[in-house]
Amino acid sequence: MVTLDNNASFSPSRAYLNRVATAVPEHECHQSFLDHLEQILPAHRASRLRRIAAHAGIERRYSVLPTLIGPTDSKAYYRPGQFPSTGQRMETYREHALGLAMLALERLALSSRDKQEVTHLIITSCTGFYAPGLDIDLVRHGGFLPSVHRTLITYMGCYAAISGLRMARDILRSQPQAKVLMVNLELCSLHLQQEAPMDRMVSYLLFGDGCAVSLLSCDPEGLELIGFHSMLGLDAIDRMSWMVQDKGFEMTLDKEVPQLIQRLLDQEKNALFQRVQPSDFGHWAIHPGGRAILDSVQSGLGICESLMEDSRQVLKDYGNMSSATVMFVLESILRRSGQQAPASGLSMAFGPGLTIESMEFCSVRT
């Protein structure tokens, strides 16, 4: 049994994101999705969506589904007049979530001893639910102790990973012997809607499936988590939403969201940059919600293009994977930061609210 030192000093400890591993399903679906749009949409709408996709900055997306769209007599998941119910989609989530999480966990390469030392498990997901859930499945099949403290962060959308990192930091600052495992898993491809307005159809061009698994501790390795800042634009709460409906989850993604994010950042600049300026950061981990969002943040904060490469590459290779996406960006930064001089960084992710969650961090030379 893992025990925490309850007699430790209350002086806050430093918390670190030590390692990140990522995984996507085997089925690449972006071009196939675009090629088969006429199966479910009128030709003029399908053509318009393909024109939009050509400028989205995305080349690949992945899905747990072997075939997304097909004719009525095919084995595709989405067929004209035969789209799955919410219950069917949740069953598909349950069938595939553990396998993808285990693949990412395997790539994290924890030893049996490492797993036994994990004291806290945090899971973020907004694309599926079941109970007993993914947390318990991971304990059963992942080699963790049944006494691990489990927390599910659900339905916070793309910014949930930043919320999970903030929770992990709070745990570690008060319990320096703790080891936190965070899992960010999203199966966004399960929520395509046939009869949807154009803004919703555009969102389906962006999203894919993916998982990130991270280890956090007080061991000085990786990225030190310095601080967090939350921003909430209450005058724009209806511009981005994620609702459970009879035929799956339905997203509202207003075309003005990039501009609204930029406006909220302008309003919050003084609070966000009290001690440092945007030019002081050597790393930027911006959630690639879409090309327009990245362009808007880059322009609004004056970030040079070379510091946006990690975010743009993740968007190009995987699309938007909701809460997992920013961790793919942080994995990329972690991969090379050990060979560079320590540098400060800022991460941001966006979601319903309209919400911006940010995290200041600093790389550690190993």
Image: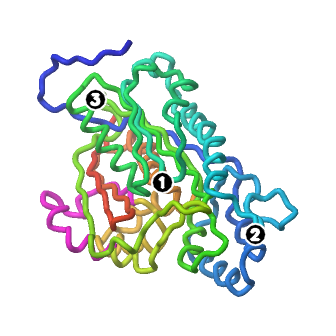
SS under mark 2: loop
Amino acid found under the numbered disc labelled 1: Thr
Which comes before the other along the chain, label 3 or label 1?
3
In the orientation shown, which residue stands out farthest toward the bottom?
44
Q: Which residue is painted at 36% across and 78% down in the image?
A: 259
Q: Is residue 275 magenta?
A: yes
Q: Is residue 57 magenta?
A: no
As displayed, is residue 309 above or below residue 264?
above
Q: Is residue 333 left or right of residue 64?
A: left
Which comes before the other along the chain, label 3 or label 2?
2
Q: Which mark is residue 325?
A: 1
Q: Is residue 349 left or right of residue 269?
A: right
Mark 3–mark 1 distance (CA, rounded to whole Å): 24 Å
SS under mark 1: helix
Residue in the foreground of this view, choosing between 352 and 214: 352
Query: Residue 338: where, in percent of width, then height?
Result: 38, 39
Q: Which residue is painted at 26% across and 31% down in the image?
A: 172
> Residue 103 falls in which quadrant of the image?
top right
Q: Which residue is mark 3?
A: 218
User: How many marks are shown on the rendered structure?
Assistant: 3
The answer to the question of whether label 2 and label 1 lie on touching residues, with beta carbons closer than 8 A, is no
Query: Residue 186: where, in percent of width, then height?
Result: 53, 50
Query: Residue 138: where, in percent of width, then height?
Result: 53, 30
Q: What is the span of residues highlighted in magenta in the rendered image?
A: 261-286
Q: Which mark is residue 81?
A: 2
Which comes before the other along the chain, label 2 or label 1?
2
SS under mark 3: loop
